[in-house]
Image (tube, grey):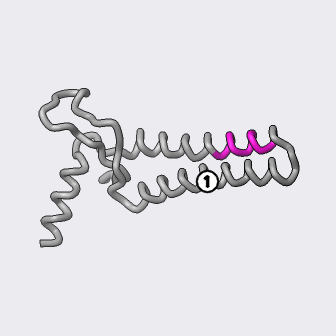
Amino acid sequence: MTTTYWFARNIRAGHQGYDRYGKGVMPVAWQGQAVIAGFVLAMVGGGLSLLLIVLYTKLFPLGIALFAILAIAGGGTFIWAAATKSDPDKSIADYRAERQKISD
């Protein structure tokens, strides 16, 4: 059974071992893009809910709690997906090269 990866790591040229990984992942499947969109929506939704709750009800602790819950859920989902659904062997450059071969 093949594993479908959602993200690929940025691998720095000229580095060996664990040090070769860059500081991030890039989506290579629609699921990776969906996780990123979910994270952005959670942060924007949390910020807007914080703003609206504070402006209309003056319940600042409730707004902070709701924002914190949404931020933890969105960030936790992104971190989980990046850690478990990232290709450990191929970089984003490898995926781009494969797509270029297919399109030619």
Left or right, 66 with respect to 88, comes to: right
The relative height of residue 54 versus residue 21 in the rendered view (above or below) is: below
Quadrant of the image for the C terminus?
bottom left
The part of the chain drawn in magenta is 62-70
Image coordinates of residue 88 in percent, x first then y, are: 28, 40
The residue depicted at 77 percent of the width and 54 percent of the height is 52
Left or right, 100 with respect to 29, comes to: left
Q: Is residue 30 magenta?
A: no
Q: Quadrant of residue 82?
A: top left
- Quickly name the residue at label 1: 44
The residue depicted at 55 percent of the width and 42 percent of the height is 75
Q: Secondary structure at mark 1?
A: helix
The residue depicted at 36 percent of the width and 54 percent of the height is 27
Left or right, 82 with respect to 8, comes to: right
Q: Residue furthest front?
A: 55
Dominant secondary structure, magenta: helix
Image coordinates of residue 40 in percent, x first then y, are: 54, 53
